[in-house]
Amino acid sequence: MMIETNETVSGTNGKKGGRGSKPFHCAIEQNVLDSLVYRGMISLADVSTAVDDSKDGSVDLETVLLDRYRVPKDALGSALSDFYQCPYLPYDERTIIDADLLKTLNLDYLKKNFWLPITRRGSLIDVLTSDPHDFDKSWDVRRTFPGMTIRYAVGLRRDIEQFLQLASGQGASGSIGSILGELVSDIHLEPVRDSLSGGIDENDSAIVRLTNQVIAEADRLGASDIHIEPYEDRQDMVVRLRIDGTCSTFMRIPSIYRRAIVSRIKVMANLDIAERRKPQDGKIRYRLTKDREVELRVATLPTSGQEEDVVLRLLTAKQPMPLDAMEFAPATLQAIHAIAEKPHGIILCVGPTGSGKTTTLHAILKHINTDERKIWTAEDPIEITQKGLRQVQVHPKIGLTFATAMRAFLRADPDVIMIGEMRDKETADIAIEASLTGHLVLSTLHTNSAVETVVRLLDLGCDSFNFADAMLGVLAQRLCKRICNQCKEAYHPSRQEYDELVQGYGTQDWPTLGIQYPADWSLYRGRGCEACNRTGFKGRVPLHEFLRGSEEMKRLIQSRAGTADMLSLAMKEAMSTLVQDGIRKVLGGETTYRQVRAVAMK
């Protein structure tokens, strides 16, 4: 719900006046304090003490609550939002403040009265204020913007002060907000020489700094991908980040700079900036600090309106994880340890892009990486490096494919071979042949489940007898959002939620968990906090499904049995499906059933 007004009032330009703002502890805002007490953010006794501490005027109540009593900013902002019935806007340096709205306003006046205009859309102006119910402020706003419809958002005083510092150019010189402000100002200050670029090219200082800051911020936020999406018809270019598997809008950049931003990324990746009609691929090695650098895989794709999208995947130089830290179920971990020690055979890790397959294979390699074993890997790209592994970067453009690398490995006296992906029958046949001639082979495949992997390889034309003899195990996995540890809370689920878990796990298998529906039974959820950007989730938890290459399973593979028959046998042999493993992690308080269904349900 928004608070909007559209009174037309003639008056001053807003430079003078200002009667100061009323103290935060006025009677009308007692409801805000009651809400904080009700939410458990602060005790009633502490509220009384905090109010007393702020009465002398040396410090306002907001500061007392935030600094002395550690009330979370988002909790206070949410309480204010509920009371004033308008959105809460926290400080974010990426917010673009329309400089034109501030031309007739005195910044000292705004700092004293704690309000400022943010954006203008036609006849609608968004105004941030510490008190949308303050009549004096509302009067000043209407006099400053006569005839306009005003839409209010509520903010904390300290956040409004930061916004005003950002608007006045006193923020960090390298911040995204200040760079965007500089670009927005350039639109009005410089004559437009090119309708598409505004005379700004990829070597402009602000464009270079903005591109660098986007990469640095994406890394700081833990993003796996950056999506640069320009639009035609003078719409703002959108930058989206994929964090914990979910894309969200990170910022918007004025459309006049879309060509310059794309060209800058192409320059960094050594791509042809003049070629806009076909896709291009490249890499960027970007140094974040003296001791840290990140590699980005760059893909450009032509889109409508003669524009180009750019997708950058962040490949941070990571160390391999130990198997014990991969959060396998105990039985699955034991089985993987056993097959990893085998002298020959094939181990497959399957799942969609970004599900952690390469991380898992490197964890297995770390477990068996000893002086006694010679290990070759062919990868595209090499994301994780290990001492002792001989790692080869695949280059299809020059003929160095996975199949070519496999043939070369077989002449280089290997014990273990890891192939980044089985993309075709040729690679699969060579891998199966190598696993039958005394080598342990590990690889990945893009399939939905462990059982479907077998059917997929047979459909590719692989020999069913050879594959059955070679298969040691197939591990399917997904990454699911993890409940934020900072704001995790227990709650008693409804009977409907319990029944959904039973149905998802399987009514015939649920009794093995020994869980009924008692009154004190609890699940967990994230309340939302600053640490998780108020989403309730931070990080990801893996889900696993492990298909063992038992003798009976090999007989089914040789006979080319159907998916249903193989799945039935696997369940009899104690295989847990992705959904079942996910539900066990729901019961353990690591994630929610909704998140499990989002990644694991068919």
Image (cartoon, rainbow, N blue to C red):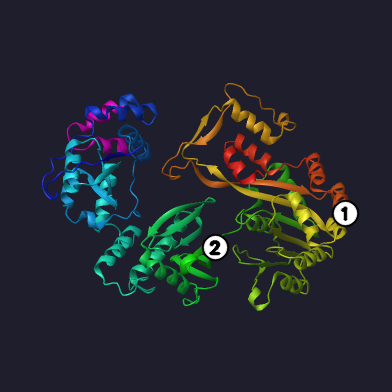
User: How far is mark 1 from mark 2, CA to CA?
Assistant: 41 Å
Circle 2 packing at 10 Å, graded few (<14), some (14-19), many (20+), is some
Give the image location of residue 185, x and y in percent. Answer: 27, 64
The residue that mark 2 highlights is: 317
The residue tagged with tag 2: helix, strand or loop?
Answer: loop
Residue 2 versus residue 10: which sits nearer the camera? Answer: 10
Q: Tell me: 366 left or right of 64.
A: right
Q: Quadrant of the C terminus?
A: top right
**Rendered position, 8 above or below 403:** above
Q: Tell me: 574 left or right of 33.
A: right
Q: Earlier in the sequence, mark 1 or mark 2?
A: 2
In the rendering, which numbered label is found on residue 466? none
Q: Quadrant of the N terminus?
A: top left
> Can you see residue 371?
no
Q: Tell me: 120 left or right of 238.
A: left
- Report the residue at 68% width, 33% height from top: 503
> Can you see residue 397?
yes
Instruction: Decide whether residue 48 is among the magenta residues.
Output: yes
Amino acid type, mark 1: Gln
Circle 1 packing at 10 Å, graded few (<14), some (14-19), many (20+), is some
Instruction: Decide whether residue 207 is among the magenta residues.
Output: no
The residue that mark 1 highlights is: 558
Residue 370 versus residue 590: which sits nearer the camera? Answer: 590
- Give the magenta-colored segment's residue range: 46-68
Amino acid type, mark 2: Ala
Residue 539 versus residue 449: which sits nearer the camera? Answer: 449
The residue tagged with tag 1: helix, strand or loop?
Answer: helix
Give the image location of residue 360, x and y in percent. Answer: 65, 54
Which numbered mark, 1 or 2, is in the foreground of this view?
Answer: 1
Give the image location of residue 188, x and y in percent. Answer: 25, 65
